[in-house]
Image (spheres, rainbow, N blue to C red):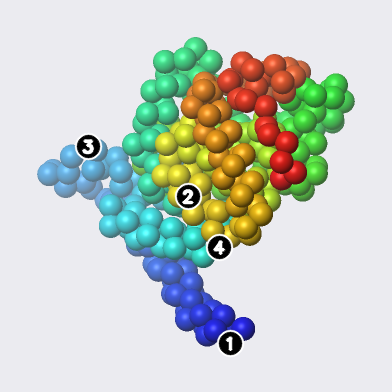
């Protein structure tokens, strides 16, 4: 116990200091934005000029150095406290550019994915007919999704808005990924406890290639006890990896048009294997 207290005293100052660093980075980003509100230099390239201005509501332009600081700091905080969803969100935005480009190409090459990119639907309480979804038959996607929200006391409105992605379309793609995350829990049959989250992260890591998902899949198990590690290694990881490899791109499905489809038929269409019975 004494050892743990000493370790906590050493870690807490680092946590507090990183919060200050994050604040400094954001202030610096805003100052950088203000500095570019005047006339642009003749030597400024169009790409450099565009990156200096907000590209969408809530966008915070940041330099490569600021992104690096945010990446390192958010990774530390996410490892220290995996439930800091704000830090996990920052990590995803500052490390996922290449993976996001690949995902965008997969969506552009799919009719339903292209429709999503064009129409940009949002999954929020303001866009959902919760009462109507609750009235759907048992086993349908809409009914099971609302059941998941109710049972786990979560809301789609708690998803962080995108801030640090310097591409307006990729920023929407990040937002879409976040808003369908609970639907992945529903389709995979996984709860929101640590074991369920790690299993979903393995599936998403294989599906998306996002470094944030890979980090969560690899590092998340360190907080599990021996029994849960055994379940994860023998049942959940092989199933999640196989499902992720077999499945079509999860961002190419317009879930809002599929509320009345059964979870079982949608799993079959996507290529998700039935979840193992493990008592997760």
Quadrant containing the N terminus is bottom right
Rendered residue at 78%/34% (across/down)? 146
Read off the residue under disc 2: 218
* Quadrant in the picture for the C terminus: top right
Viewer-nearest of discs 3 and 1:
1
Q: Determine crowd level at label 1: few under 14, some 14-19, many 20+ residues with C-alpha closer than 10 A.
A: few
User: In the image, what residue occupies the spot 39% across and 42% down?
Assistant: 96
Ranked by sequence position, the earlier of labels 2 and 3 is 3
Residue 217 position in % (x across, y down): 51, 47
At numbered mark 1, what does the secondary structure look like: helix, strand or loop?
A: helix
**Residue underneath mark 3:** 46
Residue 220, x across and y down, in percent = 54, 53
Q: Position of residue 57 (x, y in %)?
A: 49, 42
The earlier-in-sequence mark between 3 and 1 is: 1
CA gap between label 2 and label 3 equals: 39 Å
Instruction: Tell whether 114 sits left or right of 38.
Output: right
User: Counting other residues with Cα less than 10 Å from the Cα at mark 2, is it few (<14), some (14-19), or many (20 or more)?
Assistant: few
Reading the chain from its start, which is encountered first: label 1 or label 4? Answer: 1
Instruction: Residue 259 in the image: state x and y as whole percent.
Output: 73, 22
Q: Which residue is mark 1?
A: 2
Tell me if mark 4 has few (under 14), some (14-19) or many (20+) residues whose alpha carbon lies within 10 angstroms of its own. few
Q: Rounded to the nearest whole Å, what is the CA distance between mark 3 and mark 1?
A: 57 Å
197 versus 275 height, above or below:
below
Give the number of the mark in front: 1 or 4.
1
Residue 26 in sight: no
Q: Earlier in the sequence, mark 4 or mark 3?
A: 3
In the picture, the disc for residue 86 is: none
- State which quadrant residue 239 falls in: top right
Q: Residue at x 44, y 59 (%)?
A: 74
Give the structural element (helix, strand or loop) at label 3: helix
Q: Earlier in the sequence, mark 4 or mark 2?
A: 4
């Amino acid at each position: 116990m004494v050892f743990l207290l000493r370790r906590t005293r050493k870690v807490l100052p680092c946590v507090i200091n990183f919060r200050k660093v994050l604040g400094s980075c954001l202030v610096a980003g805003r100052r950088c934005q203000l500095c570019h509100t005047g006339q642009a230099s003749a030597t400024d390239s169009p790409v450099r000029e565009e990156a200096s201005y907000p590209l969408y509501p809530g966008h915070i332009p940041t330099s490569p150095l600021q992104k690096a600081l945010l990446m390192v700091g958010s990774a530390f905080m996410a490892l220290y406290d995996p439930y800091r969803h704000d830090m996990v969100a920052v990590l995803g935005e500052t490390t996922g550019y290449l993976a996001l480009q690949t995902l965008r190409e997969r969506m552009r090459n799919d009719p339903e994915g292209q429709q999503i990119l064009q129409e940009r639907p949002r999954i929020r309480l303001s866009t959902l007919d919760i009462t109507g979804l609750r009235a759907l038959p048992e086993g349908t996607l809409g009914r099971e999704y609302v059941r998941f929200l109710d049972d786990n006391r979560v809301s789609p409105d708690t998803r962080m808005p995108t801030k640090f992605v310097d591409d307006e379309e990729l920023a929407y793609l990040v937002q879409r990924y976040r808003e369908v995350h609970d639907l992945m829990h529903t389709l995979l049959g996984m709860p929101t406890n640590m074991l369920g989250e790690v299993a979903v992260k393995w599936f998403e890591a294989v599906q998306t290639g996002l470094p944030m998902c890979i980090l969560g899949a690899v590092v998340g198990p360190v907080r599990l006890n021996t029994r849960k590690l055994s379940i994860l290694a023998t049942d959940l990881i092989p199933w999640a990896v196989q499902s992720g490899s077999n499945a079509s791109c999860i961002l190419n499905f317009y879930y809002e048009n599929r509320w009345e489809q059964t979870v079982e038929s949608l799993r079959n269409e996507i290529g998700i294997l039935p979840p193992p019975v493990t008592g997760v």
